[in-house]
Image (cartoon, rainbow, N blue to C red):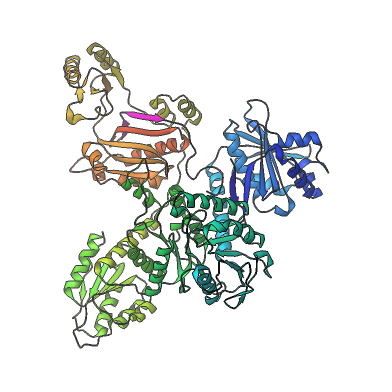
Amino acid sequence: MAADVLLSDGSTVHIRPIQPEDADRIVALHSRFSDRTRYLRYFSPYPRIPARDLARFVTVDHRNREALVASIGDDLIAVGRYDRLGEGAPDAEVAFVVEDAHQGRGLGSILLEHLASAAQGHGITRFVAEVLPQNQTMLRVFSDAGYQISREYADGVVHLTFPIAPTVRSTEVQRRRERRTEAASMARLLSPRSVAVYGVRRDGSGLGAALLRHVIASGFAGPVYPIHPSSATLDGIPAYPSASSAPGPVDLALVATPAAAIGSIVEDAAGGGAHGLVVVSAGFAESGPEGAEIQRALLAAARAHRVRLVGPNALGLANTDPSIALNATVAPHLPERGRVGLFCQSAAMGIAMLAATHERGLGLSTFASVGNRADVSGNDLLQYWRDDPRTDVILLYLETFGNPHKFTRIARETAREKPIVTATAGASTHHPGLDAEASAALFGQSGVIRVQTVTELFDVGELLAYQPLPTGDRVGVVGNAAALVSLASGACEREGLITEAPQRTVATGAPPPDLAGAVQAALADEAVDTVLVTIAPPIPGADVAYEEAVAAVATEAEKPVVAVFVGASRDRSRLRAASVPTFSTVEEAARALGHVVRYAHWRRSPAGTMVEYPDIQFEAARAVVHAHGEVWRLLRAYGVAVLRTIAVDNVQAAQRAARHVGYPVAIKAAGPELRHRLDLGAVRLGIADGRGLRAAFMEIAERFGGDVLVQPMAGPGVACVVEVVDDPAFGPVVGFGLGGIASDLLGDRSWRAAPLTDSDARALVRGPRAAALLQGYRGAPPVDEDALVELLLRVGQLADENPEVKRLSLNPVIAHPMGVTVLHADISYGEAVPRPDTGPRRLS
């Protein structure tokens, strides 16, 4: 239950259960309360805590009575508690109090989240609270939490009652607060007022000296303090034996000392006021078990001293804002100023990527390389960049995914406003439970543009950073060589782009105004959304300034323009000045365009809404789940009917079952792997009478055994499969595909994370490669797509609300023009373990 959490200002605090040993700390905390705070909490002056009350405060059973404390170092700064109103009662009284100096930083809402989570684990479903009317701050904590609150006023006190199960609104509130706190934490790191540097050698060698030079050379706006135990100056700059001895507070500490010596530096930096630590030193988890243990100790020290940790084994941070001008990296130069946020993990890749931005002239707003990612991760930077007014495009080079579910959630929200491009070459997006294609589909659900190489990352990034988003998928190709124009058209078509607009070709040695006119004509064409200009090398000896011609037209264009210069090219500075991305091959250009066009289409598509079905019987469903009950009962509670099935093991029982459900019937071998295998003869359909039933039963029994299922005949339609998998990385995910052995063999499934929006469910239905069979293939009537969408929404809600469900399969589901029929369902239950990206806020 212990956790480190971020407050509203981005600083950290530790939450843990109270212990009897905290008695003296509770007394000290109480002594620091103002008279007003004591009165609002205890409804009386309560100047001191009597010994009997103190013993009760610090002694709880962590079930019927729980108390959580927030601490900074050894000092307690807040206490929250609940007391159950009777043994086994569903209600508990909740209250908390925060030291005056730390009020207004979000501690009340954090304690409420953690207390509610703890109480739910012990069968408490509702909190009650009593608050004085003048305690408006506390009333806002409750009312702003997103719970459905009932309030009454009596005897001078406001009485509040509310269920503590997470709601859509309470989850939204929690995640909004999470975003603000994580963004604030990153802002403190990326915009420090002062910097301290540890590990600077006297002779100017090593990473520490490089860090110092780079911070100074970047023109950092604040003071820089080298920290050295014995030198008075380093590189001509006054040095100090400790951060606390520097003439001003330290915001950010850069560390390049050996791994084993860093523990004491954390304490020293925190003592000087540092809230961030960038460790570029190696020798941690990347070096083996011993280094991993040192890294764990480093993180523990950072958390204990309320310091965010970048690294270790990181390249560092950079901020091109002229008011900051921070190059806190091992790379020698501050990147050019721009509107792209760039993230990577390894220092080596970071150096290469910064060099690539310089070569391409791609400007950055901020940069972060976090190395081993012990604390600060790509998710933190996404939270910051989402609302950063200086960042329009986000580029991520990811080697590992720590919390894929949280990444996809944050990315899905961010990508609606700012494009996110990820290169995951070498990064595993495949986790136990799902194959690689399914994992990739879940990332695609978030709108993230996934590319395979760093070159492609920057190709797409340039296009997004410097050109407007295309409004459609139609490309007009212009060039000075017919063969090259034709090649470009083919490359675009392979990316799913449309090139039906007339190709415009000028002679290879044509004067630049001719090419400019062709580009202008393409831009004016209403059947063109993007213009791709292809330039072949000019005839030897010709001096044709095509770059300037393209740049002049593109500067005034309202549609995206990209250029391909095949072979050697002259200076492209004019094109860069006109923000025209340039490529060396038509394949590179078409690939980048394809990514951007698909992203633009995703962004134009409705985000979707969560659908609530009033007929769902949640309590009945939970009773079935707790008993590991029959799957058809659970599905019925969620409004999903399963066609009645009677299991038999002899002919006479089969005939009785058939008469009971009514002819015509279907009979099937009972084995889950056989009961949809019409191709093997394990299924017989349309049996009209007892004689036919006897013959079919004997044939199935002879081949597959005597256990047989009898069902009424379902109407004709398309066989489908609906699946739920509780993936350890993504949480519950829903899959949809068409039935049949071929679809199983090819893994033709679409996947989305639960809970589903209506857009998610429709995308699932349309996602499989064989989905055309649902729309009326070769004269067949189209199925009821809305009925399939509703089925998936209900199943998605079931998966989201019942963590004990590990696997669920509806196979087959017959989709037909008038609805859907679920023929069979199977379920696997397990222990309800905490899911990724759920529960109260905490640092990982």
Residue 415 falls in which quadrant of the image? bottom left
The question of residue 205 being in magenta is answered with: no
Q: Is residue 238 left or right of residue 728?
A: right
Quarter that holds the N terminus: top right
Q: Is residue 567 left or right of residue 606?
A: left
Residue 730 sits above or below residue 677 on the image: below
Residue 552 pos. (x, y %): 34, 81
The residue at 45%/38% (across/down) is 800
Which of the two residues, 211 or 603, is positioned nearer the viewer here?
Answer: 211
Q: Is residue 561 left or right of residue 77?
A: left
Residue 250 pos. (x, y %): 63, 65
The residue at 69%/49% (across/down) is 74
Highlighted magenta segment, given as a residue range: 817-844
Which of the two residues, 511 or 347, is positioned nearer the viewer here?
Answer: 347
Residue 266 falls in which quadrant of the image? bottom right
Residue 73 pos. (x, y %): 67, 51
The question of residue 825 being in magenta is answered with: yes
Is residue 132 visible in the rendered image? The answer is no
Residue 603 pos. (x, y %): 39, 57
Residue 151 sits above or below residue 841 on the image: above
- Prevailing SS of the magenta stretch: loop
Is residue 422 visible in the rendered image? The answer is yes
Q: How many marks?
A: 0
The residue at 60%/60% (across/down) is 265
Which of the two residues, 2 or 802, is positioned nearer the viewer here?
Answer: 2
